[in-house]
Image: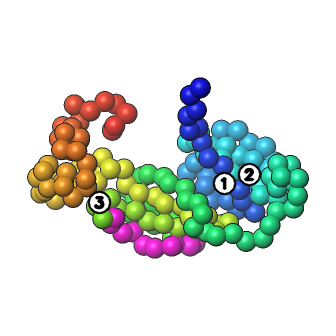
Amino acid sequence: MLIRYHSCCVFVDDILACRDFYEGVLGQVAEMEYEKYVSYDSGFSIMDRAYTAETVLGRAAGSGRDPLAFELYFEAMDIDAVVERMRERGVEFVHPVREQPWRQRCVRVLDPDGNIVEIAEPLVATVRRLLEQGLSPEEVSEQTTLPLDMVQGIADPGSLPDCAH
């Protein structure tokens, strides 16, 4: 029997505030929605924590949790534009845009329920940015830890499959 990952569900205390964050700030599109549940076309969903505790666990929801227990990960080609939109909306930042050790730029914020949300540039964008800065494909491969043939493929987009763009 083959079991494949499908999606994740984030349990939230304030579904309306979280909908505003994921839809209004991050531009996610609701695919299916019920009063206590919303699934997004990008493959994740949010569900009311108290409702879930009652219907799934048969008990009241506990209070508080470790905010480092979960992180949602998104990608965006223009991190700076995303950061500006989040500042305009008063989103709480965990940290400003930073470059990871593998050179990918990212930012982490908190959704209205205190869940950590990371938005990073796709590795394709990282490779292109580094190549535009004058690094050789070999240097980019070494700094990003991506295989050289992948870096070379990104440098020559015609050689990559459509899903890698």
Q: Quadrant of residue 43?
A: top right
Left or right of 19 on screen, residue 96: left
At mark 1, the secondary structure is strand
Residue 68, how many percent across, how many down?
57, 67
Tell me which amino acid carries mark 1.
Answer: Val
Q: Residue at horizontal 83%, vertical 52%?
A: 57
How far apart are labels 1 and 3 at the CA level? 28 Å
Is 89 one of the magenta-colored residues? no
- Over which residues does the magenta segment extend? 90-100
Q: Which quadrant of the figure contains the N terminus? A: top right
Q: Residue at horizontal 68%, vertical 66%?
A: 113
The circle on residue 47 is 2
The circle on residue 10 is 1
101 over 139 or under it: above or below: below
Tell me which amino acid carries mark 3.
Answer: Trp
How far apart are labels 2 and 3 at the CA level? 34 Å
Label 1 or label 3, whichever comes before in sequence order: 1
Q: Nearer the viewer, residue 28 or 162?
A: 162
At mark 2, the secondary structure is strand
Answer few, some or many: residues within 10 Å of disc 1's Cα (few below 14, many 20 plus, some between 14 and 19). Answer: some
Mark 2 in CB contact with mark 3 (< 8 angstroms): no
Q: Residue at horizontal 18%, vertical 55%?
A: 142
Whether residue 26 is visible here, answered yes or no, is yes
The circle on residue 102 is 3
Label 2 or label 3, whichever comes before in sequence order: 2
